[in-house]
Amino acid sequence: MNAPLRRVGVVVIVLFGLLFANLNWIQAYKADEYRTSDYNGRVQVAKYDRKRGNIEAGGTAVAVSKETDGELKYLRSYPGGAKYAHVLGYEPVNGAATGLERSENDFLAGTSDQLIVNRLRDMVTGDRTAGGNVLLTLSGRAQDTAYDELRNNNRGATKGAAIAIDPRTGAVQALVSMPSFDPNPLASHNTNEASAEYNKLEQNAGRPLRNRALAEVLPPGSTFKIVVAAAALENGIGKDTNIPAGSSYTPPTSGEAITNAVPSICPQSQVTLMKAVTDSCNTGFAKLGVQLGPDVIKEKARQFGFEQEDLTVGRLGEGGQAVEASRTGTMENPDGGADPAALAQSSIGQRDVRMTPLEGAMIAATVANNGSQMRPYLVRQLLAPDRTTVYDTADPRELRRPISGQVAADLRDMMVSVVENGTGRSAQINGYTVGGKTGTAQSAPDRADHGWFIGFALDSGGNPVSAVCVVLEEAGSGGSAEAARIAGQIMRAAIADPGGR
Amino acid sequence: MTAAATPATSPATAGERPGVRLARSRRNAELSLLLLAMALVAAYGAMVEANVLDTITPSFWVPAAALTAVFLGMHLVIRFLAPFADPALLPAVALLNGLGVGFLHRLDLARAAPEERADLATFAGVGGRQLAWTLISVILAAVLLAVMRDHRSISRYAYTLGLAGIVLVMLPAVLPASISEINGAKLWVRIGSFSIQPGEFAKLALLVFFAYYLVRKREVLSLASHRFLGIDFPRGRDLGPVLVVWVISLLVLVFEKDLGTSLLYFGMFVATVYIATERVSWLLIGLVLFFGGAYLAYVLGEAVGGPFANFYLRAQIWLDPFDKPYDDGYQLVQGLLALGTGGLFGTGPGGGQPLLLPEVQNDFIFAGLGEEIGLFGLSALLVIYLLIVERGLRAALAVRDSFGKLLAGGLAFTLALQVFVIVGGISKLIPLTGQTTPFLSAGGSSLMANWLLIAVLLRVSDAGRRPVTGAGGKVNRPAGGPPEQLHGAPTEVIKP
């Protein structure tokens, strides 16, 4: 029996050799992968050893880390609650962060390359390096107003968004998505509570976690007429040129007639372009679109920012929250020729045209800023942990120039006419010149219409101070007028408190 | 079956001269190794406190001292009752047991609120309970050494133990899940807050039976054969008992939902059959049967589910644990992450995050330790296990009777297999199954059973290393000792 006993001994050594080899594989070869794995909670624990930096808007901290007694030394909390939720996102213990908490994570956590000098110095002095602070462009008053007015809209809409930007720089003055959520429970150190809260929000039919201002695309309705009008102005049609209109228009090949919102709008056979914009004449723009053709309209929309898939809003040049691409959709037949029915409906912002609230605000801002579209951003400045050194100050940059100064001036006149004489009167502000365009978009036959307003405010010197887009989903009739009123309130707040830039 | 292990130089009168015997019994080596092991356990406790509490409390040595007292008692028992026992076994086991207690105490510290940590009583929590279990287990082992003065005497109870073993194995399977199922494996018997794992004791009982049965049957199993492909295969009718054990292990696999236990019993049986018969064919038959059965269970689990679904799920997790990292694969994923985080050197005792691991005091204690002591520490632990196993096998080589050889060899291999199954399981070498890590995991059943196993190995090694004395010497030879009886057996079994 001794020979097999010795062989059993060899088998045991082989088995243990396998264990040893496998442990080498895991603890040496795969160690780094496992150590930094997303599923590894230790990464999270280590992260909480260091005080994460503040995020501040208008001199007020809206995301702070408080010291705790627990295993995780700092608790992330959001004093602004739901108001800033879609800008800041949240930083959960388990799972992925969102919003600026995600895109500015390196600097907030103090692991950014920019903070290496601080880290080295703290290594010598023995301090725990804190994270850097992120200063936002938001105007506290504009954000308050946008949040309150949106929630208290007189149409009873429960979903919507508002975004205000400074047309001269692209700095975001206000960004609100409704319904919102309180990010504090999601950052709780009690991960069971946090994930329960997350699941509740995730399953909420109103999708509160979604940032509608950047990520929701809806049919823009008549606000899209600004794009068509810009295309017309560049194709030999002046703002006082008469264009064909009428009480009803049935495009060739389609039996579906396009009418105006009320019979009193442009029943005559000819109206000026100015009048067509002011009164939001559907038949006029449908015919104009068919006349211009799909290529011209799509190209103009593309120049305004439609179809851009890689735009982000955060720090200039350093990423941020992704912006959903706005789309013009199909206006051609399968054979490639124009489909007049689709073209006519697309020209009044229906059919397959889809736009984000941000794109709406950018169109208004471009018109206000003499045709120059600035790249939108939220992060104004990066401040060292000790608040002495400024690491990065936003340097506003032009994103594109969709229209000439002359076309912009003509569009401005038309949009000002909308607010002074037309559908957007509720956006007026004393002492400022306000221009804009309302939109009422049909979404589905069984749902109420979405109400839109895009607009801008110019000071007495003609300088643009704010551009806004407000959308109230399924707000029904009067939704666009309420959107215009809210937009006026937001711009008024932005004038009083311009925020940082 | 030779006495070659006994040096020829030993004088026939050595039995009369305590001084000579003590010099060769190596008990003092055992004592110094034991003290060294306990010093390591004390150092481990100090490092844990330094890392978790940022200070070393004046009472850091208390658990190590308590353990030392317990193991010194065992040492004295061995000195008097098994003076020629292998001197490396006790210190090696004591080191593992001590580190286990230390790690469990470290878990208690982590679970306690920070302000209460410094005041945490040494004998509180899981660590304290493990300390108590250690005391009970060592006493049981000492009692076994005292009662069983010759390992051959337990062969008298072989059939009783065999029956008891089968009952213990099957007990959790037939009991309702509310009593027997914990974490998906039906391995337990729970009475109130008290729960035992009968399987841990069953393996000892079954092994005694296997050893006895195979010693009686070894001739027929090894001689009567058909030659095929150059390998001698046993006759069909002799396969009966093997098939019975195979079926039992597959039933365990299916009804107790536990591959590890099944693999353990079957591997234990195949190994003892092989040692008894010296026939490679038995190994081949065993491996084919086991892997064929496991593959069949996998296929059935995929196709029909039912009782095989659990096994299929475990195999799936093994193939890709990161497929459902927060769900089915959670345990294995967390185990791998802990091991990976530890890396080569580990975070240091007390420096890791063991509470992130599910089941860290049971199945995943090796991963929890691995995070803190790293690859080097785990390798050292593996070497200690290997040392215990190889010492057990050496005892089997040295002992003179077949029953003792089979018993010690089988026990040593079983221990090795159990370490392989659990450590291989948590490190994704084989599908994960719920086995305790011998001497480390929290829990009385496992600790007691493994200490009893060590007591048997000590007894066998004592018999093997004891010098052969002249007629009428001190060697115990029970009246009508089993070996002679067993050797006389073959004639009655060749006929069917």
Image: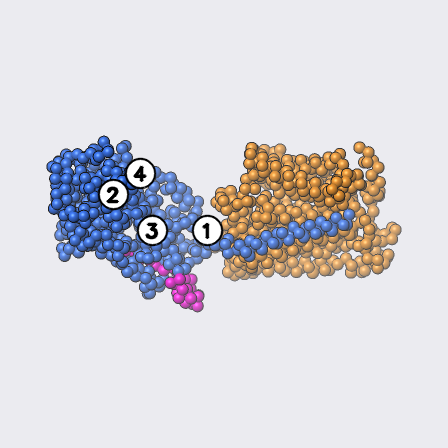
Q: Quadrant of the C terminus of chain A?
A: bottom left
Q: Is residue A71 left or right of residue A337?
A: right
Label 2 vs label 1, nearer the camera: 2
- The answer to whether the residues at label 3 and label 2 have Cβ atoms under 8 Å apart is no
Rendered image: mark on residue A294: 2
Label 4 vs label 1, nearer the camera: 4
Task: Report the Cα–Cα distance between label 2 and label 1.
Answer: 47 Å
Q: Colour of chain B?
A: orange
Rendered image: mark on residue B361: none
Same chain under badges 1 and 3? The reply is yes
Task: Report the Cα–Cα distance between label 3 and label 2.
Answer: 24 Å
Residue under label 4: A334
Residue extent of the magenta highlight: A113-139
Mark 2 or 1, nearer chain start: 1
Mark 4 burial class by Cα count in 10 Å: few <14, some 14-19, many 20+: few
Query: Numbered disc 3: what chain?
Result: A
Q: Residue furthest top?
A: A255
- The answer to whether the residues at label 4 and label 1 have Cβ atoms under 8 Å apart is no
Task: Report the Cα–Cα distance between label 1 and label 3.
Answer: 25 Å
Tell me which residue sits at (80%, 41%) in the image.
Answer: B223
Rendered image: mark on residue A310: 3
